[in-house]
Every structure is written in C-alpha cells, then in structure tokens.
Amino acid sequence: MTSLICTLQDHRDDVNWCAFSGKLFATCSGDKALRLYNTHDFSELPFSPLTGHGYSVHCCCFSSCGQFLASCSTDATTMVWSTSTGEIEAILEHPGRSPVRICALSPDSAHLVSGASDGTLALWDFPSKQLLRTGAVSDTTMVACSFSPCSQVFMTGSTYGDLRLWDLDMNQLHAEKNAHDLGVTCCTFAPSILSDGHFVQFCLASCGQDSHLKIWAVNKSGSGGYKMQLLHTLTGQSAPVLCCAYSSDGQLLVSGSVDKTVAIYDAKNAVLLYALNQHERYVTACCFSPTSPLIATGSMDKTVNIWRLEDGCSDLGGKSLPEQSALPSSEGRTSAGRSRLLVSDWAEGDVSAWLVEEGLEGLVDRFMANNIDGTELLSLTKETLASELHIESAGLRSKLLRKVEGLKSDSVCSGIPDEFLCPITRELMREPVIAADGYSYEREAIESWVNTKNRSSPMTNLPLLTTLLTPNHTLKMAIGRWKTSH
C-alpha cells in the first residue's frame, strides 16, 4: 500500500517538475522559483527558494552526485545551481533564445541536453558548460527528453507526437512517428540495460495527450541500428497523461494525469497497482527517490505530495522516513502581521514594519532615508542595494532579495484571480494589453517578449501575425475594482 506522509505547499503557482537526488529533493514552478528540501524530514534548505529565472521554470534535474541542479525556463536559459550554496554556477543561453521547455542530464553527468519551443536541441558539455552542437525538428516544440542508462544516446518527445533517438553527435538514430496522438508529454528510460552479446535493449516509458502511457523496447542490433517495439499500452487514466517516471530498480512506473490521479504500475507486467486521488488539479510532475521507498507528485494545485510505499513491492533500499506525525506539512510563510495591502501599494512605513518583522531592523533607517516604498522594494536588485543603498555585505543583500522574492510570490497568489495575472510574469497587471494571439499581457512584459522572442506567442508558441497591442480597458477597470475591494 501507499501512504501520504507529507504535503509541501511553498510554491505560489503550478508545480511543473520535481526531482530527487540521494539527500535532496527539488521542485520548480510557474512562480519562477525552485525549492530545495532535505529528504530526511523534507525541511526546506536555508538558501531556498532559488531565484534567478525571469519566467516559469519548466524542468529541473540533479547531477549524478547531487552536487548540481539544472533548471530550464521560458526565459530561454538553462541554469546550473550549486546544491550546497544555492548559488548560480552557470547560465546557458539556448541558441536562438527560444523558451526552453525541457532539460536532461546524462547519468554520467558528462552531457546536458536542452530542448526548446522552436524544436531546437542544444547539447552541452556539462563539466565545462560549453555548447557542443545543436539539432532541430521543424514545426514542433520539444517537451520531453531522457538519456539512456549508458549515457550514449537520448530520446526526445515533441508536441507533434513523435519520439526520436539521438546520439551525442546529434545524429537521429530512429524516429517513431505518431508515438502518441496529439503529442508526447514526457518520456523516461528505465535504469537497466539488457544485453546478450548480439543486441542491447533499453526500456522506455512515454506518455501523451492521447491519455496513454506506453512501454517500449529500444533495441540496438549488432550492426549498430536501432528499432523500437511497443510492448504495452497502459490505459489506467482517463485523460492526457502529463508525466511518468521509473523507480530506481525499474520495477515500478508512476504517472500523473489531467484526471487528477496518480497511477502506479508494475512495469514488468504492465499491471496497475495503485491509483491515488489526493490532488485537486492536474498532476504535472512525478518521480521516485533513488534511495528510499518514496514517490513525489506535483500538481497545478501548487502542492507536492510525498508518498511512501509500505508493502515492499519494490526493492528500493535505504532509510525509511519517520511516521507521518513526525513530518510537518510545509506551509506558506506569510506572516499574520503583514499588511493586507498589495506590496506595490505599501507606503514607506509598511516597508519599515516588514523589515522589522523579517529581522532586518538594521536596514530601516537606510530604507527610510532613500524613501523606499512597496514599488521600490519590489524593484530592488543586487546592484541597487550595493550602489544606491550602500549595503556592503553580499550575504545581507542575498538574504534581503530572497525575502523580496518571497513577497512577490505571496503577492502573486494571495487570492488574486488568475485572469488578472500576466501570463508572462505571473504578476498583477497594471497596463493590460491584448496581443494578436487574443491573450492579455502586461504591456512592458509583452513588448520585451516580442523584442527578444522572434514574435512568437508566449501562450501558443505560434507566430504573432502583428505586434499591435490594444489596451484592455475593461480588464484594467476590473483589476482596479478588485484592488479597491481588497
């Protein structure tokens, strides 16, 4: 059986991905942040959340030793973070500056692949963080990627519905067209390799918009050619399947769906073992711990559930967690004494009160002398803190900016109707405008997007037929009424 032992509620937007290393657990979200937890008790690390991406973070993955965490975002970058300090080790800008939807590290941590919404792939040498080569599939968006357990080939999946196998020279070794009708959403290799001297076989799981989870055999012949064979089609979920993952021994397979369920299968026999129903919205992320009998599932309900397998149905070794009573749920950190005003509407006195509340009373006089109100607070950067406010301590600057990012997240999701939030920044709109794709955006955000993203729609990835922006006066008035009533 499975039991829910912990629910993490720190993110302020959809949870897009989650990943385990031996001792750490990472999540990423549409709120532009990553969060890191200790797997012993799922307490958040002191330097979490990790902030640096400009837009939604779509995927994250650990290096094999757990020393690094890679993440990718709509901001067209893949970032590499130190898991011991939370600092950014490298920023990898995707060729063409297209939004990056997926990233994957090879099991030997020698290579990293990033895939973008324009169908391009970038292969990076991970130790040096240098771009090695690129590839592309036209007229599609890359949304799935997984390295084989030997680290020598990787599979990609796209919204077009195909699965493609690549080598490290960016040669396409095999293309499985229409693997999933309406599009692939995720793919993952099983950790084991079968070989008898004449052929090598990998197992691959993939899922898609067709509501199916499929298990494939990927066979390499003695001559070096590859073929794919469909072994099983699993139909335990009634809506598009958005994510899937193998256990570290390859015996179990978990998937999450638009129908809000989590399905756990016996991977070898293709038998549904458990169906979990605790999420309130689409299940968008799932993963197994490599060292403990744990499963994590993330959702558009902004939560991450941690489950424990208790009947030994998989040979997952390692320590077990304390009983449920010993594990606290991670609650949002909004203080009860904080002003009910939007942060952007805070006066200088509200900012001073917040500094005292957060243990930063030593900065009050400096902030008052510089007339820092809520709008100024939200726009602070490391550069302005150093040059204008003369805060010399780098640690203090980082601490303050982390707390400001927390304020931004709290502001974004403190009950604000979703239609009032800019799809790009996920912040309350001040000057909403309608773009050619029919969606409303904050004027500054969509203008910046159009200037740097080759005139593609942030919502559909299709070309914008015109860059004309029309003020959305009705929406602006509705936002104004909402602000007055709150």
Image (cartoon, helix red, strand yellow):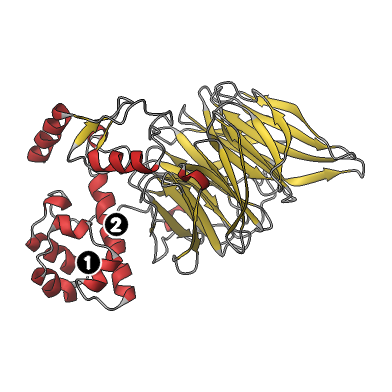
Residue 474 location (% of width, % of height): 14, 27
In what quadrant of the picture does the C terminus appear?
Answer: top left
Q: What number is the disc on residue 405?
A: 2
Residue 56 location (% of width, % of height): 39, 45
Q: Dot 1: within a 10 Å radius of its alpha carbon, few (fewer than 14), some, or many (20 or more) residues?
A: few
Residue furthest bottom as drawn: 392
293 over 349 or under it: above or below: above
127 over 224 or under it: above or below: below
Q: Dot 2: within a 10 Å radius of its alpha carbon, few (fewer than 14), some, or many (20 or more) residues?
A: some
Question: Mark 1 touching mark 2, by CB under 8 A?
Answer: no
Going 9% across and 69% down the picture, which residue do you hit? 368
Question: Is residue 30 in sight in this rendering?
Answer: yes
Going 16% across and 63% down the picture, which residue do you hit? 354
Going 33% across and 75% down the picture, which residue do you hit? 394
Horizontal side, residue 187 vs residue 351: left or right:
right
Question: Is residue 244 in sight in this rendering?
Answer: no
- The span from disc 1 to disc 2 (Cα, nearest Å) is 13 Å
Looking at the picture, tell me which residue is in the foreground, 446 or 41: 446
The amino acid type found where label 2 is placed reads: Glu
Looking at the picture, tell me which residue is in the foreground, 380 or 237: 380
Residue 351 location (% of width, % of height): 13, 62
The amino acid type found where label 1 is placed reads: Glu
Horizontal side, residue 226 vs residue 130: left or right:
right
The quadrant in which residue 391 appears is bottom left
The quadrant in which residue 119 appears is top right
Mark 1 or 2, nearer chain start:
1
Looking at the picture, tell me which residue is in the foreground, 69 or 73: 73
Q: What number is the disc on residue 358?
A: 1
Residue 32 location (% of width, % of height): 37, 49
Dot 1: element = loop
Disc 1 versus disc 2: nearer the observer: 2
